[in-house]
Amino acid sequence: MTQAPGTGVISSWDLSVGVDGPGTRFVVFTAGCPLRCRYCQNPETWRMRDGRASTADEIMDRIAGYRRFISVAGGGVTISGGEPLLQPRFTAELLSRCHGSGLHTALDTSGLLGVRATDAMLADTDLVLLDIKSYDPATYRRVTGGPVEPTLRFARRLAELGRPTWVRFVLVPGLTDAPENVDGLARFVAGLGNVERVDVLPFHRMAAAKYERLGLRFPLAHVAPPDQASLDRVHARFQAHGVTST
Ligand code: SF4
């Protein structure tokens, strides 16, 4: 889809606390994603054609209405999706305008299209939320349908640029929880130097009803969320590598 400068396609926007970066966030969910993660909570964002055209001006006006609310206690704006780097110019404009106006900015991405993020865009990004859905390439492909290497390359580039990053890892029993997968990710993250923390997100099935509404099959409907013991085991592995996990 060709886009005029300053326009993009979004799925929705929302306010969130504590899950999309520090503090209260104004979150823009861009439309379109090249991956198909088995546990995706936002299948309505997958196809760009299901989104609605929007301009950066419109979104900035909307953000302005919440500015005081999100500015307290270190909140800000998060560009999420879908995959924001599918619309790099639009994403760059939003990040630049928010950053330029003094708002804390975060970019939530799988990193698959990390080459589309310019250094200037990343300089306008106060925090990258990098979803590394697995370290082992075969597991990554099983989870997402895509390759892990572009994400790992992007992670290394963020480290070279010294961009503050939170890594996010969804723990799915029987899918991502193999000790060698977790250890590989912990070792990789420990070597980067710019990752402030790893968020270990327990898989859940809350999106199942959404899939049903959309006429889609939820591929992990039969998988139970991880128990506390397996979460504790995974945190211990990150901590053994000197990585802060939450
Ligand atoms: S990258 Fe995100 S939006 Fe895309 S399929 Fe995976 S979880 Fe869903």
Image (spheres, rainbow, N blue to C red):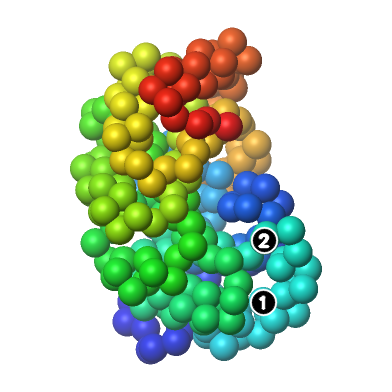
Q: Which x, y percent locates residue 230?
A: 54, 13
Q: Along the horizontal axis of the image, is 207 left or right of 184?
A: right
Q: Quadrant of the N terminus?
A: bottom left
Task: Establish whether ligand 1 lies closer than 8 Å to the Cβ of label 2.
Answer: no
Residue at image location 58% in from the left, 32% down from the top: 246
Residue under circle 1? 63
Q: Which x, y percent locates residue 201?
A: 55, 33
Instruction: Residue type at mark 1: give it.
Output: Ile
The relative height of residue 11 versus residue 5 in the rendered view (above or below) is: above
Q: Along the horizontal axis of the image, is 101 left or right of 86?
A: right
User: Quadrant location of residue 4?
Assistant: bottom left
SS label for mark 2: loop
Q: CA distance from mark 1 to mark 2?
A: 12 Å
Q: Which x, y percent locates residue 204?
A: 60, 30
Q: Along the horizontal axis of the image, is 127 left or right of 65?
A: left
The disc at residue 122 is none
Labelled pair 1, 2 in contact (Cβ < 8 Å): no
Q: Is residue 160 visible?
A: yes
Residue under circle 2? 75
Residue at image location 65% in from the left, 36% down from the top: 206
The relative height of residue 133 versus residue 139 in the rendered view (above or below) is: below
The relative height of residue 3 versus residue 240 in the rendered view (above or below) is: below
The relative height of residue 230 versus residue 49 in the rendered view (above or below) is: above
User: Quadrant location of residue 134?
Assistant: top left
SS label for mark 1: helix
Instruction: Residue type at mark 2: give it.
Output: Gly
User: Quadrant location of residue 62?
Assistant: bottom right
Residue at image location 43% in from the left, 18% down from the top: 240
Q: Is residue 47 visible?
A: no
Q: Residues within 10 Å of mark 2 (few under 14, many from 20)?
A: many
Q: Residues within 10 Å of mark 1 (few under 14, many from 20)?
A: many
